[in-house]
Image (cartoon, rainbow, N blue to C red):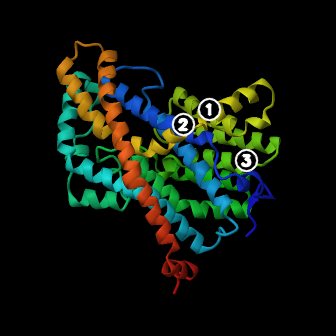
Amino acid sequence: MKDKIAGAEIDGHAGEASRIGCLDGLRGLASLWVLVGHGLLLSGWHIPLADSPDFGVDLFIMISGFLMVFHYVQRRRREPWAAPSTWIAFWIRRFFRIAPLYYTALAVAIAIGPWLGDARVDIASVVPGSMTSMERYTDQSLQNILLHLSFVFGVLPDYGFRTALPDWSIGLEMQYYLALPFLMLVVGRVGWLAGTLAIGAAGVLVFSLSPTLFATFEMPSVLVLKLHIFLAGMLCAAALGRSRRVVLVYALLAVLLAALPIGGRTAPVALAARMVIAVGMFGLIHHAMLGGVLARALSRMAAILGSRPFHLLGEASYGIYLSHLLVMLPAVGLVATTLGASTPAPARFALAMAITVPVVVAVTWLAYTRIEMPGRALGRRVLASPKLRRFAANPSR
């Protein structure tokens, strides 16, 4: 199949570079946005945008859309898009990137859920508006566990937000991984502009057919509600190596997709924030197209985000995201019961973060070295298995 971007073969920049350095920094900043945002919410301190961890998740989603297309395109010569073996390799690669640490965090979250629920009650006694359903902490049923182990939970309204982890986005990510090979077949056949418009329109149509059903999801854990954000990131990757005109067209389409009032908060301020995220990501990655002072400023910013400290932060981002609530909930609960509601929210936030951050850093380092990296290595061994290669070459046998 001929891999097309707006009628031209996918070629050039995306196939030459092995990584886009500034994305490490963006992933790290997204994880900090989620961590700080939850800390602010649980402490009752309102700082506009900063106390909105869902925007940090949207940044993660956009980056995921970019990276999956970026790497899919890089591997296209040895892993043709239309080959089932490519799909199998992709799914195995992503499973071993996500599942080992997630399963570990899930086991901890289920085991200590009731204790975390007690901490949540303590927090709510000081910040009543922060309370969520206690079933997130008390449901230790086999059904809940199996739904999460299989990653099916995100498509079920009653289970998309039913552990102490912020794992609604993990189930969402897995749905996206499942769909990506088929999305790439579409854009490979008709080109990125027509393909993205068709996929985006299909998502809007599905949503519009049953908005009441999708309103029952406590979090936007089903793909239809965030497909447009993934598509915005995908377009950013598809624009690599293209002309200035094509980059601008793709950027405009990505911004319009980010502004669709679907999934999560849909107030004008929230939609504007997602548009800014899309513009910022395009600017950092495609700054060379702009020229002038703005291009130089964005180039310096991209270089900083790609530096060693931000690279390490990006590598730690998944561990930070999964572990922070397991540490933060008891920390904020302790602060709430110790200081009480009479203490200003900024003071409660500062003390809770002083407890949370060092522990999260230690837990993340252990998780990265002992679980994430061995999990990735196991995935590579599975992919190298002769039996798997034979099966992937002819899955019908």
Instruction: Judge whether residue 304 can be spotted in this image.
Output: yes
| Image quadrant where residue 22 sits | top right
- Residue 304 circle label: 1
256 over 292 or under it: above or below:
below
- Closer to the chain start, of discs 2 and 3, is 3
Image quarter hosting the N terminus: bottom right
Q: Are marks 2 and 3 in contact (CB under 8 Å)?
A: no
Element type at mark 3: loop
How far from the left and from the top, in percent, is residue 209? 50, 51
- Residue 239 circle label: 3
- Residue 152 circle label: none
Query: Residue at position x 40%, y 58% from top?
Result: 99
Label 3 Cα neighbours within 10 Å, binned few <14 / some 14-19 / many ≥20: many
Query: Residue at position x 40%, y 51% from top?
Result: 369
Q: CA distance from mark 2 to mark 3?
A: 24 Å
The amino acid at mark 2 is Phe
Q: Depth check: 93 or 131 in front? A: 93
The amino acid at mark 3 is Ala
> To which residue does mark 2 refer?
310
Left or right position of 335 against 155: left
Left or right position of 187 against 112: right
Q: Depth check: 29 or 148 in front? A: 29
The amino acid at mark 1 is Ile
Query: Residue at position x 21%, y 39% from top?
Result: 116
Q: CA distance from mark 3 to mark 1?
A: 22 Å
90 over 156 or under it: above or below:
below
Q: CA distance from mark 2 to mark 1?
A: 8 Å
